[in-house]
Amino acid sequence: MKNLEFLKELNPAQAEAVRTIFGPLLVIAGAGSGKTKTIICRMAYLVAHGVPPEKILLLTFTRKAGKEMIERAGALLKMDCNKIMGGTFHSLCQYMLRFYGYLLGYKPNFTILDRSDSEDLINLLRNSLGLAERKKRFPKKDTLASIYSKMINQQKTLEEILSHEYPQFLDHYYEIERLFIEYVNYKKEHQLMDYDDLLLNWLEVLKNFPEVRKEIGKKFEFIMVDEYQDTNFLQGEIIKYMGETHKNVMVVGDDSQSIYGFRGAYFRNIFEFPKLFPDTKIIKLEQNYRSTQSILDLANVIISNSKIKYTKTLFTLKKGGRKPVLFKAKDETESSKFVADKVLEFRENGIKLSQMAVLFRSAYHSFDLEVELTKRGIPFVKYGGLKLLESAHMKDFLSLLRIISNPQDFISWHRVLLLLEGIGPKSTEKIISSLKQNLLNIDYTLEKLIFQFPQKEFKELVILLKELWKNKKSLSEILISVWDFYKPIFERIYYEDYHKREKDIEGVIALSEKYNLLEDFLTDLILEPIEVTDIEKPAKDEDCLTLSTVHSAKGLEWHTVFIISLIEGRFPSAYSIHNDEELEEERRLFYVAVTRARENLFLIAPMTIYIPGEGKTLAKLSRFIKEVPPSLLEFYKEEEFKEKELDNGKKFKVGDIVKHPHFGIGEVREILSSEKIRVFFEEKGNTLLNLKYTNLEKLIM
C-alpha cells in the first residue's frame, strides 16, 4: 500500500469522508472547509487501496479544476493518476455519445452547437416559418433559446415556462411549440447537438439501454461529483443511472452556495440525493480555513434564516479578527469614495490590490465606482466579460473548421458563405439548398456550383475544402491552411481592429498542437470556452483591484472584500422580492459574497440612489443586513470618513531616511503637499505615497 501520510493533515470530518470508500456518500462542505483537499485525498486513498485509476470518474464544474485535482492526487502518491477520468458533465456526455450515440441514430462525428449557434439556428427556422414577419411581437432568438433550454434543464413544459417567466408570449404558444419541434428535427437530421442535448441524449441512452448501464458500472466503479449543489435535474438523473449497479457515489457540495438557479441548477438535488441512493452516509465539513470567526459569525446568521438547509455552523481555529464593517453612505458617490480611500489605505499598509475585491449583485452596480477608481488612477479588472468563442472572428474561424469536420453542418455553411465577397443571403440559400439535395456527393456538387457562383473567394473555399477532405494533414496544418484562406477575409471585415483580434486566432492555432483529431479539438473548445483576449486588461504582473459580480467570484477568496449596493432592489434583486425561491437564492448569494473574505469585510449601502426619470430616491437597507444582530457588526461613523487636513508632510523633508512596513527603507526625494511625498525605495524605485494612509517611520541615521 502507498504512503498515506497525507491523512495526518486532515481534520476528523475530512478523514472520515476520505476513508468512506463504499456506498453512497454526501459531503456537505461549508465555505472554505477544504472540500477540494478532501476530494483529492479521497482519490489518492482509492488508488492507494488498489483501485485502478481508470475505474474512477471525477465530475467537476470545469475541466481545468478536474485536471488540477487529478494531478494533485498523483503528487500525493508520487505516481501518475492521469488515467482517472475527470471533466464536466457535458464533456463526459459528449465522450460517451461518441461511442453510444449510434443507439439514438448519431454518427461519432456529430457537431456540438454552442449557445450562439443554437440561437442562429432558431433564428433561421423562425424566419423560414414566417414567424419573424408577424405583426404581434414574436420573441427574439436569444429569448427563444433561453425558453427551450429552461424546458430541458428544468424538465418543465413550454406552458409552465411561459406562464411563470414569459407570460407576454403565451399568445404565441402554438407557434413557439411548432418552432421547437422544427428545431429538434433539424438537429437530429443534420447530426447536431446543443449543450442540453448532450445531457438529454446520454440520459436517454442510460434510461433505455440497461446493458449500457451495466457496462458503465463496470467502467467506472467509483464516481465522485464536485459542486453537486449546482447540478440540474438531468445531471442528478445521470448520476442515479451511472451509479445504479455499485452505488459507490460520493457527491460534495454546499446547499448554502447554490446560486445558479437562473442557469437551470436544481437546488433540491442535494436534498434528494439520499432518496436516489437509500442508506446514504452524510458527513458535514464545518471547520473553515479561510475567514476569521467574526466573518463566519455573520455568515452563520445569514444562512440560519434560510428555509430549507442542511444545518451547519462554520467555525475556525484562527484567533482574532475585526468585525465586519457596515458603512451607510449618503449616496453612491460617497460609497465609491469610501471604497477608493480604503483601497489606497490598505495598499499603503502593504496589502496588494490583487488581494482586495469589490463584489456586487449586478454588473451595473459598479459603474460609479469604476469612474472613481479611474480618476484616482487605481488599476482594476472587472470579471464577467465575453468568452473567446462569443467573439465574431472566432465564430467565423470555427465555422470553417466545423465544415471540414462535418460537411452537413449547414449552420456553419450559412455563416461562412455570408463572409464571402459577392455571396449574399439569396446565393447562400441556393448553395445550401444544392448541398442538402446532394449530401452523398458534396465534392461534386461544389465543383458544379463554382460555375454558377464564379466569385473568387467562393472558388478558393471550394479548393480549400476539397484539399483538406482529400489529404490527411496534421491538425495544426489544417488550422494554418484555414487561416491562410480566412486571413484576407478577416482583414477586410475587421479592418478597424484586426491586428488586435489576430492574437486570438494565433493562440488557438498554438493550442491545437496538443491535439491529434479536429473533432476532439472542437469539442474541447466548445465545452471549455477560453476567455477572450482583452487588450485593455492589465499585464499579468500588474497589481490590480478585482471588481466582480458575486456569481463570478464563487470559489475565490481575498484578504479584504467590499460588498457594495446592499439595498433593497439591488441585493436582493428587485426581480426576486416577490418569489420565495428566488429570494432564498439571493440569500445564498449574499452568504457566498461574505465568505469570500479572509480578514476584512466591508458592507456598504448607499442610502440615496439616482433612478432615471425619478431623480434621487431614498433607498432601504437590505433585509439581509437588517436581520443581523448589531453586536456582530462594527458601524462606520460618518465623521470618521470626513476628510481631515493633515500636517504629516511637515514631519518629513527631502533627504530623510524612512521605513515603510511593506517597501522597506527609502529616501524622501520630493514633498508634493501636506499629504503627498515621493520616496525612493531600492527595490520599488520612486513611489508616490499618501501620508493619510501610510504608516511611515522616520529613521535617525
Image (spheres, rainbow, N blue to C red):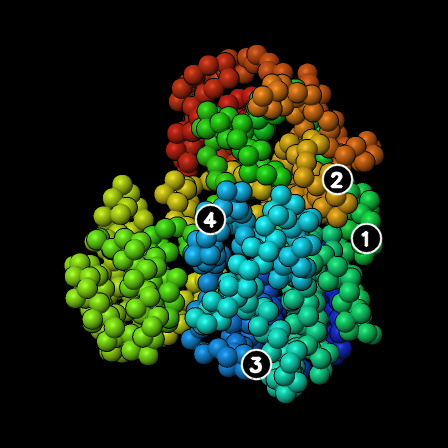
Residues at marks 1 and 4, CA–CA distance in whole angstroms: 43 Å
For numbered disc 1, what is the local secondary structure? loop
**Cβ atoms at labels 4 and 2 below 8 Å apart:** no
- Bin the neighbour count of mark 1 within 10 Å (Cα to Cα): few under 14, some 14-19, many 20 and up: some
Q: Position of residue 144 (x, y in %)?
A: 54, 52
User: Which circle, 4 or 2, is nearer the viewer?
Assistant: 4
User: Which circle, 1 or 4, is nearer the viewer?
Assistant: 4
Where does label 2 land, which residue? 578
Q: Position of residue 130 (x, y in %)?
A: 46, 53
Residue at position x 68%, y 36% in the image: 574
Residue 54 - label:
3
Where does label 1 land, which residue? 308
Where does label 4 land, which residue? 132
Residues at marks 2 and 3, CA–CA distance in whole angstroms: 48 Å
Q: Residue 219, relative to residue 36: is it above or below?
A: below
Please tell me which of labels 4 and 3 falls first in the chain.
3
For numbered disc 4, what is the local secondary structure? helix
Q: Residue 619, relative to residue 484: is it above or below?
A: above
